[in-house]
Image (spheres, grey):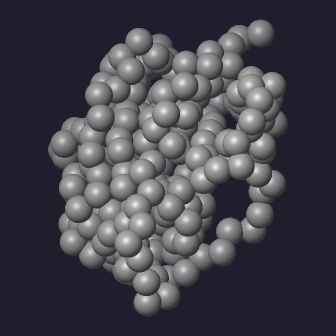
Amino acid sequence: MRVRVATTALGITAVLLAVPACSTDTKPGTAASARSGRPADAAQQAAPLTSAALETRLLDQSDLGSGYLRKPERPTQHDDVTVISCPALSELGGDAATGGTLTFPHKAKADFAYGGSSSQISEELYSDSANKLSDGISRIFDAMTGCANYQVVGGGTPIDITSQKLPSPHDLGDEQWSQLLTFSTGGRSTVVKQTAIRDGSLLLIVSGSPALVDRHLDKAVAKATATS
């Protein structure tokens, strides 16, 4: 499968997750799912939030505390890469990845670096119907956690990726997904934890250094789902 993918570890994760939510090629639950919680139903069909409304629900530096610096948004550089040894991702189709964010219509994102180190945390918010969010994100996590080991090659540089399904935080939102990704290239490795929470018509994804994701996940969910 050939996809357009960013060259940073977090960028690779974001683009491999960029599967059109309207796809119906794979039925939810047919792979080893990372989902937990209650599936969407008709009672959860709240009106989607606008991108502007989502922007106000993102964590900011005052929420995170000292030592965090928000990274400016930049045009993402993409390379053509090949995904090797991951049938689950290949089944999604060569045009499944279309950019650096998921293809739900309403979205907002913030990236932060911590303490001048390589530690990073990224928060993404999406809004659509509960059913579309549930079906889309479960299909994506099923595909990624369905491959314990695979490789992407872009610009002649191979990146080995391992994925591991993690226990999800059952007490947050309506549905939860979580995974640990390790990116290895040139003798160096980067570990990224990624946790997704769906609450009604809102989807939150927090990615980054595992300790930072664990530290700020509850806070991110509380702010994103606040009604006032």
Count of labels shown? 0
Kindly indicate the quadrant of the structure image that contains residue 186: bottom left
Give the left or right position of residue 88, taking residue 81 as reference.
left
Image quarter of the N terminus: bottom left
Q: Where is residue 220 in the image (x, y as percent from the top left)?
A: 62, 25
62 over 79 or under it: above or below: above
Percent of width and height locating residue 194: 45, 41
Where's residue 28, x and y in %? 27, 41
Q: Residue at x 75, y 36 (%)?
A: 67
Report if residue 49 is visible in the image.
yes
Observer able to see residue 132: no
What's the residue at 78%, 57% (across, down)?
A: 73
From the top left corner, tell me how far across and down residue 147 is, in percent: 22, 57
Query: Please, which residue is most extreme toward the bottom here?
Result: 156
Question: Is residue 73 or residue 42 the one in the foreground?
Answer: 73
Q: Which residue is depicted at the point 64% across and 50% down?
A: 117
* In the image, residue 30 above or below residue 212: below
- Report the front residue among 148 and 141: 148
Which quarter of the figure has residue 185?
A: bottom left
Query: Which image quadrant: the C terminus?
Result: top right
Q: In this view, does 47 lie above or below 210?
A: above
Going 37% across and 51% down the picture, which residue do you hit? 181
